[in-house]
């Protein structure tokens, strides 16, 4: 029987040590990893590692496992307590513990840009995933009329100057949140001949919209959809 020489044993031991070091640094899959990022709801906070338990002071917790004093902290920072907006946001938080105003607004801003550009491009597939059935039907009808006239929209999204929640409420098990969004957009509509019939391709226009997003809090689907639109004069 052949024996390993000293050099072989040395490298074998080194490989085992490196393996365990990498394992400690990178960790292992346990089946409890975070799900993919949901743009319409905030991520849950990380739980303290087991080794840090002795350094954590336990606080009174509500039925959802959050610190009772912090449950509505983000909501109270956004809307003064006892106002209708604050009450509405609290009601949504009670129905959906993952709801956070800031995370919602960030996701809504992303959705706003996607919807505006999808409408300009006539991208029905993208719109279908982001709009309620009623709003989708309205958008598609407008796109079809535009296409029937042979018109095309030339559009560039500059950015969002302001996005703020102006109202919130629960309607049965469905959460509704309305935002006022002020954005900047370059847009021009051209006819079959390429002549401009609306807008200006060289001018940045300010656009003010009031959009309402909704989500069924009883559903496992985390996505919010646009259910109402209104242009602000």
Image (cartoon, rainbow, N blue to C red):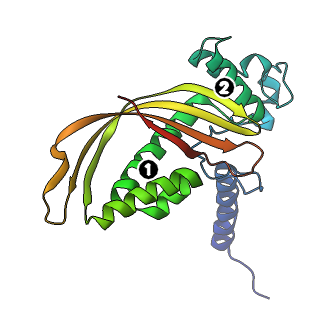
Q: Position of residue 92 (x, y in %)?
A: 71, 31
Q: How many marks?
A: 2
What residue is drawn where x is 41% and y is 62%? 123
Q: Residue at x 75, y 81 (%)?
A: 3
Q: Which residue is mark 1?
A: 115
The residue that appears at 71% across and 32% down in the rendered structure is 170
* SS type, badge 1: helix
Q: Which residue is mark 2?
A: 89
Farthest residue in the bottom direction?
Answer: 1
Q: Quadrant of residue 181?
A: top left
Give neighbour class at mark 2: few <14, some 14-19, many 20+ (Cα, 10 Å): many
Q: Earlier in the sequence, mark 2 or mark 1?
A: 2
* Residue 108 in the image, given as x and y percentages of width and height: 51, 40
- Asked if marks 2 and 1 touch (Cβ < 8 Å), the reply is no
- x then y, percent, for residue 213: 57, 40
Answer yes or no: is residue 122 visible.
no
Residue 139 is left or right of residue 40, and the answer is: left
Q: Quadrant of the N terminus?
A: bottom right
**Relative horizontal placement of residue 32, taking residue 145 as reference (left or right):** right
The local crowd at label 1, few if under 14, some if 14 to 19, many if 20 or more residues have their Cα within 10 Å, is: many
Label 2 and label 1: CA atoms lie apart by: 24 Å
Nearer to me, 101 or 230: 230
Helix, strand or loop at label 2? It is helix
Residue 40 horizontal side relative to residue 150, left or right: right
């Amino acid at each position: 029987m052949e024996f390993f020489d000293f050099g072989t044993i040395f490298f074998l031991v080194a490989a085992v040590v490196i393996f365990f070091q990498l394992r400690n640094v990178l960790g292992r899959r346990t089946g409890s990893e975070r799900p993919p990022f949901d743009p319409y709801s905030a991520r849950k906070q990380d739980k303290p590692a087991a080794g840090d338990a002795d350094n954590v002071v336990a606080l009174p917790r509500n039925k959802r496992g959050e610190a009772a004093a912090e449950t509505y902290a983000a909501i109270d920072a956004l809307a003064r307590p006892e106002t209708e907006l604050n009450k509405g946001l609290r009601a949504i938080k009670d129905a959906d513990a993952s709801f956070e105003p800031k995370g919602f607004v960030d996701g809504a801003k992303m959705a706003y840009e996607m919807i505006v550009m999808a409408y300009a491009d006539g991208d029905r597939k993208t719109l279908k995933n982001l709009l309620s059935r009623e709003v989708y039907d309205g958008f598609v009808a407008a796109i079809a009329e535009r296409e029937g006239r042979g018109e095309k929209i030339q559009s560039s999204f500059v950015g969002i100057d302001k996005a703020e929640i102006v109202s919130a409420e629960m309607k049965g098990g469905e959460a509704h949140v309305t935002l006022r969004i002020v954005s900047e957009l370059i847009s021009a509509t051209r006819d079959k001949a390429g002549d401009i019939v609306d807008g200006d391709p060289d001018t940045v226009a300010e656009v003010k919209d009031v959009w309402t997003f909704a989500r069924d809090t009883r559903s496992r689907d985390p996505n919010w959809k646009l259910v109402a639109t209104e242009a602000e004069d």
